[in-house]
Image (cartoon, rainbow, N blue to C red):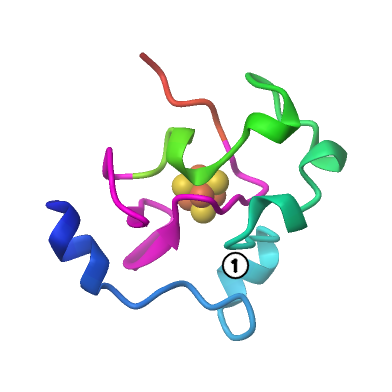
Amino acid sequence: MAAAQAEELPHVDPATDPTAQALKYSEDATQADRAGAARPGKAPEEQFCSNCQFVLADSGAWRPCSLFPGKAVSENGWCASWTLKAG
Ligand code: SF4
């Protein structure tokens, strides 16, 4: 998906999105409990949607995520399913 298209997707809203709540998604990773989740692959403070395996664009402030079909997550976000992008 082109970055321009991704920018037009509705943003995941943690206040109303059950998946976001279940996964503790925050559009500001520094506000999320990355240390508590202790996901492997990178130090907690280096984990962002932008370097997650599930993000579906290489650039853009807002990007599609395979866990949130039809919506966009912040490049600076994080959720408990964070997984280091391979390659
Ligand atoms: S799966 Fe990855 S890209 Fe999607 S919201 Fe969670 S941390 Fe962000």
User: Residue type at mark 1?
Assistant: Ala
Q: Is residue 85 left or right of residue 78?
A: left
Which residue is outermost to the top?
Answer: 87
The x, y position of residue 54, in whole percent, is 41, 41
The answer to whether 12 appears left or right of 79 in the picture is: left
Residue in view at x 53 percent, y 78 percent: 13
- State yes or no: Cβ of the residue under disc 1 lies below 8 Å from any atom of ligand 1: yes
Residue 78 in magenta? yes
Asked which quadrant contains residue 26, the reply is bottom right
Answer above or below: position of 85 versus 78.
above
Quarter assignment of residue 9: bottom left
Q: Residue at the location (66% across, 58% down)?
A: 23
Which quadrant holds residue 69?
bottom left
Give the class, few, some or many, for how many residues have Cα within 10 Å of label 1's Cα (few <14, many ≥20).
many
Secondary structure under tag 1 reads: helix
Q: Which residue is mark 1?
A: 20
Residue bounds of the magenta highlight:
56-82
- How many labels, in total? 1
User: Is 64 part of what is drawn in magenta?
Assistant: yes
| Residue 14 image position (x, y, % from top left) | 61, 75
Residue under the image location 87 percent in, 41 percent down: 36
26 up-or-down from 8: above or below: above
Between 19 and 86, the one nearer to me in the picture: 86
Query: 53 left or right of 82?
Result: left
